[in-house]
Image (cartoon, rainbow, N blue to C red):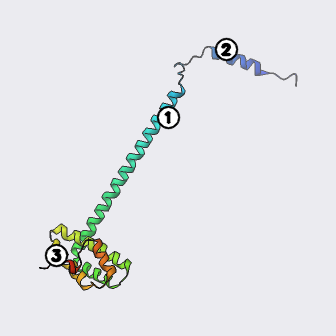
Amino acid sequence: MGSEPRPGAQLLARYREAARGYQDTEPEVRRSAAHLLDAAQARRTGRLERERATREADERRRVEAAEAARADRLDHLARNAEQTWGTVGDLIAQKNSTAYDRAFALLDDLRAVHARTGDITAFEERAGQLCEAHRGKPALMRHFDKIGIPHPRERPAR
């Protein structure tokens, strides 16, 4: 063990000699804690702004897609208006709240279809006929109230 070479001291001496000639190209910049905190806050603010912009863009795309889907649904209903009115009647005949909700969602869409064509009077007459035919159903009358269709007894005389 005593006869083995010990390169440690020689290696360390060579390293120190080589390191003396080495100099950074850029002097070390010391930053204060306040500087580091400011930089962290700026990065955080930038990240939050990017996340907010992404959320807003996603929401905008979602709204546009929903509007496009509603427009397609209304186009389909316009082509099949009579069938849709029949479906509304069938749903009302089921006499339950879930069916009423579905019927009134369709009525809301039918109102939009008639409003698109400028013939809202036809919708009001048809909805009024439904209301008249089912006036003895209080739960149904509440649904008519929700979408703003007056009860037959409240409709103005012609």
How far apart, in angstroms, are the residues tagged by discs 2 and 3? 99 Å
User: Considering only vertical position in the picture, is 47 above or below 22?
Assistant: below
Check the picture and name the quadrant holding the N terminus.
Answer: top right
3 and 1 marks in contact (CB < 8 Å)? no
Q: In the rendered image, which residue does mark 2 sit on?
A: 17
For disc 3, the neighbor class at 10 Å (few under 14, some 14 to 19, many from 20) is few
Q: Nearer the viewer, residue 149 or 56?
A: 149
User: Considering only vertical position in the picture, is 29 above or below 112?
Assistant: above
How far apart, in angstroms, are the residues tagged by discs 1 and 2? 40 Å
User: Considering only vertical position in the picture, is 47 above or below 19?
Assistant: below
For disc 2, the neighbor class at 10 Å (few under 14, some 14 to 19, many from 20) is few
- Find residue 75 and report its horizontal and vertical position in percent: 23, 69
Q: In the rendered image, which residue does mark 3 sit on?
A: 122
Q: In the rendered image, which residue does mark 1 sit on?
A: 40
- Find residue 3 and report its horizontal and vertical position in percent: 87, 22
Which residue corresponds to the image point at 42% horizontal and 46% vertical from the top-left?
51
Which residue corresponds to the image point at 34% horizontal and 55% vertical from the top-left?
61
- Find residue 56 and report its horizontal and vertical position in percent: 36, 50
The amino acid on which the numbered mark 2 sits, given as a three-letter code, is Glu
Among numbered discs 2 and 3, the one appearing first in the sequence: 2
Check the picture and name the quadrant holding the C terminus.
Answer: bottom left
For disc 1, the neighbor class at 10 Å (few under 14, some 14 to 19, many from 20) is few
Residue extending furthest toward the left: 158
2 and 3 marks in contact (CB < 8 Å)? no
Give the SS element for disc 2: helix
